[in-house]
Amino acid sequence: MYFSLIRLRRNVLPKDVVALGNGNAYQLHKLIWNLFSDGPDRRRDFLYRYEAVHGCLTFYTVSAREPNDPSDLWEIHSKQYTPKISKGERLAFSVRVNPVCSKRDERRRRQRHDVVMEAKRRIAFKELPHQERPHVATLVQEAGLAWLKAREVGLGFHVEGNNEAPMVRADGYVQHKLFRGKGVEAVDFHTLDFNGVLTVTDPDIFIKECLYKGIGPAKGFGCGLMMVRRIT
């Protein structure tokens, strides 16, 4: 596996990238895919996260292959990614996710629901008097943390803290709508950012299932890549 830092070359302006995508957010999203696409049938084998670092368009990726830039737009720094992690090790982490839960409708079809919107629905948020409504930030924190904790065992880690004594912050709750073209249904999803501390309970699972494969859905749209660092 490879970890890469990808950013625009200094002689390339952000407006030049916008021009490449004709101002279309979905086309801009495809720019990062182009760095890993070597054929029309290539399936995604990478995770990525977008950040604006000092105002510069920047991506972090974890991938099975090194990215390749035929357009010469990007400055790419790649290194082999083979984490050495022990059971019980504590790590600071940051991850952007698409937090959804699955429910069956009246026809028994499984559908995905955003966990924050589902939390609002459960308490009939809109029907509550304004003075009785919980703060949205509280709903985001509680619903987000519950979503993350439900995935601990399958991903080989334990999140420290709880709602009464949180050591994980859930914020940056944003709705995204990506338009893929005229007459094509838009891609609509929410993201949530987690920052906090975890303890590794199963290093093999944590590396293979969490760090390499990512967390949750919408990985093709920049979700799921967990960034970690050791706590000294």
Image (cartoon, rainbow, N blue to C red):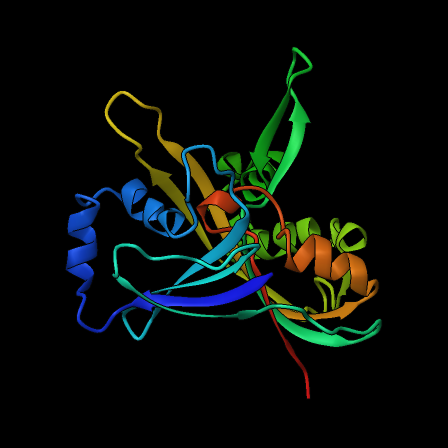
Horizontal side of residue 129 vs 163, given as left or right: left
Residue at far bottom of view: 232
| Horizontal and vertical percent position of residue 1 | 60, 61
Q: What residue do we see at 81% from left, 74% from top?
A: 86
Horizontal side of residue 50 vs 160, given as left or right: left
The C terminus, quarter of image: bottom right
Is residue 5 depicted above or below 217 in this figure?
below
Compare residues 158 and 89 and report the one nearer the observer: 89
Is residue 46 depicted above or below 57 in this figure?
above
Q: Quadrant location of residue 101?
A: top right
Is residue 232 depicted above or below 17 in this figure?
below
Q: What residue do we see at 31% from left, 32% from top?
A: 180
Compare residues 174 and 62 and report the one nearer the observer: 62
Horizontal side of residue 144 vs 158, given as left or right: left
Q: What residue do we see at 65% from left, 13% from top?
A: 106
| Horizontal and vertical percent position of residue 44 | 51, 43
| Horizontal and vertical percent position of residue 111 | 60, 25
| Horizontal and vertical percent position of residue 42 | 48, 38
Q: How many marks?
A: 0
Is residue 146 depicted above or below 106 in this figure?
below
Q: What residue do we see at 62% from left, 52% from top?
A: 214
Quick check: can you spot residue 156? Answer: no
Quick check: can you spot residue 29? Answer: yes
Q: Quadrant location of residue 195?
A: bottom right
Q: Quadrant location of residue 63?
A: bottom right
Compare residues 5 and 128 and report the one nearer the observer: 5
